[in-house]
Structures are given as C-alpha cells and as structure tokens.
Image: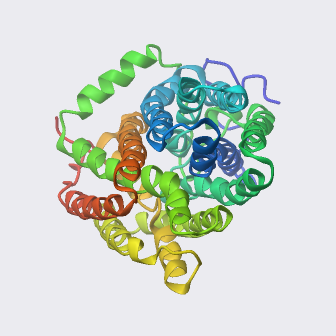
Amino acid sequence: MNPTTDSATPLAAPPRSPSRPRMHRAWIVAAVTFVTIIGGAAFNSLPGLLIDPLHTEFGWSRGEIGLAVSVDMALYGLTAPFAAALMDRFGIRRVVVVALSAVAAGALASVWMTAAWQLMLYWGLLVGLGTGSMAMAFSATVTHRWFVARRGLVSGILTAAGASGQLVFLPLCAWIVDRHGWRPASVTVALAALVVVPFVWLLMRDHPADVGLAPYGGTYVEKPAPAKGAATRTLRVLADAARTGPFWLLAGTFAICGASTNGLIRTHFVPSAHDHGMPITAAASLLAVIGVFDVIGTVFSGWLTDRFDARRLLAVYYALRGVSLLFLPMLLGPSVHPPMVFFIVFYGLDWVATVPPTMALCREQYGEDSAIVFGWVLASHQVGAALVAFLGGVARDVFGSYDVVWYAAGALCASAALMALVIRRAPRDGLVKR
C-alpha cells in the first residue's frame, strides 16, 4: 500500500511510470463507489414496505410515518453539499466510512423503537445524515476527481447504483417483511451497510495523485491541499450560485424529479397498489423491476449526455415522466397486467435518467465548485421528495386514495420540462456570469 495514500501533502513527483496500466485505477475507485452506494441505498428500499406494518403494529397514521420518511429525505439532500466539502477537507474514504456507520446505527436502533419520535430520530436523523453523505454529490466528487474522459457515462453508472441497490434489496426486504416482520428487514439493511466498510477503507483513494496517476483521460495534477472551513465554503458556494439563474432552474427541476420519484413512487407506490388489492410482495417486485430498467436508462442517459444538449434531454425526460404518471391511476389493480408492466418499464427507464444531464450542466456552469453546487441542487431534489412523502401520506388519510397525488405530480413534471428548456448555456469561460 502506498504510504502517502492518506497524506494531506500533495505529491511532487509525476506519475511513477509512463506506461499506461492495463486497467486504470479510476475504474477500481468507481467500482468501490458503485458498491458503496448500493450498500447505502439498501435503506431506501424499506420505507414503502414498512408503512402498512408500522401502521398496523403501532397505530401511527400514514402522515406520521410519511413525516419521518420526509425528514430522512430532507436531511439526505441537505447533508450532501456539506459532505462534498467535507470530502475536500478530510478525504472521501473517512467521510464515507462514518456515513455507512451512521446508516447501520440508525437501522439497528429502529428495531427497539416504540414511539413515533424515535422513528424520526433513527430513520430521519441518523439514516438521513448517513445516506446524505453518500448521495449523488459523492458520485459527482469521484467523477470530477478521477475522470476527464467518459464523465457522462461514469456519472450514469454511479447514479444507477442506487437503482441496483433497490433491485437487490427490495424483493429481499419484501420477502423478509412478509415472512418474518419488519425488524429482521431493518437488521438486514444495517448489515449491508457494515459489509461495505472494509471495501471502502482498503480500496478507496481520495485523489489520483495518491497513487501517482493522472485522472482517466486527463493529465497528471498535484493533489490540492485539504480545503479548510468546509461549512463556510459550502455556504459561500451556495451564495454565489444563488445569484445565477441556472441554479434556480436546476434546483427547481430537480425538486420535481425528487417529488416524482423518491417522494412519490418509492414511498407510496407499494401502499397505493396494496389499496387496490395487489399483494405487497407483488408491488415490491414491480418497484424492483423499475430498478432494473433504471440501471439501463441511467447508463444510456450518461452516454447521451456525452453527445447531446443536456437541457433538451432533461425536457424530454420530464415530459415523458409526466405523461406516464397521468395514466397510472387507471392502471392500478389487484393483479399485474400488460399495461402496468409497460408503465413499470417506461418509468424505470426515466427514473433518474435526469441525473447525468443535471450533473453535466452543473459542471458546465460552475466548474471546480460543481460538486458542491450539485449537492445543493440535490438538496432541492430531496426537499421535493420529502414534501411529497409527507403530503402523499396526508392525502391518503384525507381522500382515501392517492389519485390526486399522481395527477399533481404529472402536472409538475410538465412544468419541469419547460424549465429545463430555458436554462441558458454557460459562457465560453465555462462559468455563468454572476
């Protein structure tokens, strides 16, 4: 192991060998990042599965449970920009190990909860802070540091890791909840987070210069000194970005993205399908299938982002998503039929296909601060998700169905498509003018 791996002092020497390795170390770092996001994303598979069991066991309303989920989602987003700055200060590896430990602690502690405030503390606070530190700002940081070529493709692959976690854990957790109850499922999620820790500690590196390499497709650069004042820098970047129009358009569109995916489908699809007589395991399996096509759609979106105008891609993605949501209330029923399968495939391809072009626009507009700016844009994503996770539960309590929520989300997606089209291009210097 290189003794300078965790040193804060930049390497002064050029790459140790002029010959190109058979596999660039960047791909190993990307693989570890992929596995880490899967481990952290395991917890995101649980909320939609546990609404009915927690309501039955404790008598908590769906609004109360939705509020706890919304706290988790909001903190997931609000933590991301600070986590990106902390990674600049303390290194990716240390931040991610602490984050995984927080997720495991929250998931394990929830096994002994007896009151709704404990649900908000364990699910909301601990898991929200942990998963937020491994959010898409983590992917943006790794992509920006380790890759020059293939950034769109890599960002698509890493974004798909969350869907892969859903694909792996949703059917498993649904089966565990159905056969053994919700507590063993929560323990399973905690163990998944802990299993990833050794891989991160042994294989993750903070910067290509740590191992004497240039970024993939780029030229060798020295490792910068640790950035001090992480919180101050994060807030300064927000203040600078907030004076530009593209930031608010990106934040607004991504808030709608979060509302129509994590807040709506991930949290409320399973209980909504169950309202129509569909077994929970069948509904969870459909949600897992969304994860399969999400991987395909997101990677393909990354490939498209390397080749086409990111603004137009976003407009198409949001328009198609809005149309599909308007049809969903007519498709829900006690059994799985071909039109529902078509919706699942269609929606899965579009699920987070928005992420690679959004990352690309952040890089185009904000340069070296792009990871932190994207963290703030992600915060808006999760605030949107949190609002709909809570309001969706309230709507179900008040109206007795989720129909009004599906229609409202479809209309929001249409507005996001229009917002994406009016994002202006960055000047030739690569940064928006303040």
Q: Taking 144 as reference, is 339 above or below it?
A: below
Where is residue 384 shown, x and y percent of the image?
A: 35, 44
**Of residues 43 and 49, which is closer to you in this image?**
49
For residue 15, which quarter of the picture?
top right
- Would residue 204 be visible to someone looking at this image? yes
**Residue at 36%, 42% in the rendered image:** 387
140 sits to left or right of 14: left
* Residue depicted at x 71% and y 60%: 171
- Looking at the picture, the colour scheme in use is rainbow
- Residue at image x 53%, y 57%? 271
Q: Quadrant of residue 356?
A: bottom left
Instruction: Work out which quarter of the rendered image holds the C terminus and state it.
Output: top left
Q: Is the N terminus in the top left, top right, bottom left or bottom right quadrant?
A: top right
Q: Quadrant of residue 2?
A: top right
Of residues 279 and 153, the one nearer the viewer is 279
Rendered view: 47 above or below 86? below
Of residues 373 and 218, the one drawn nearer to the viewer in this rendering: 373
> Would you say 192 lies left or right of 386 here?
right
Q: Residue 65, how many percent across, how many down?
A: 51, 39
- 317 on left or right of 248: right
Provide residue 160's location: percent of width, then percent of height.
57, 57
Counting labels gives 0
**Residue 197: x percent and y percent?**
76, 33
Q: Residue furthest top?
A: 229
Viewed as shown, does residue 241 lie left or right of 100? left
Name above or below for residue 339 compared with residue 141: below
- Specify the farthest residue to the bottom: 338
Is residue 150 visible in the rendered image? The answer is no
Residue at point 72% right, 39% down? 186
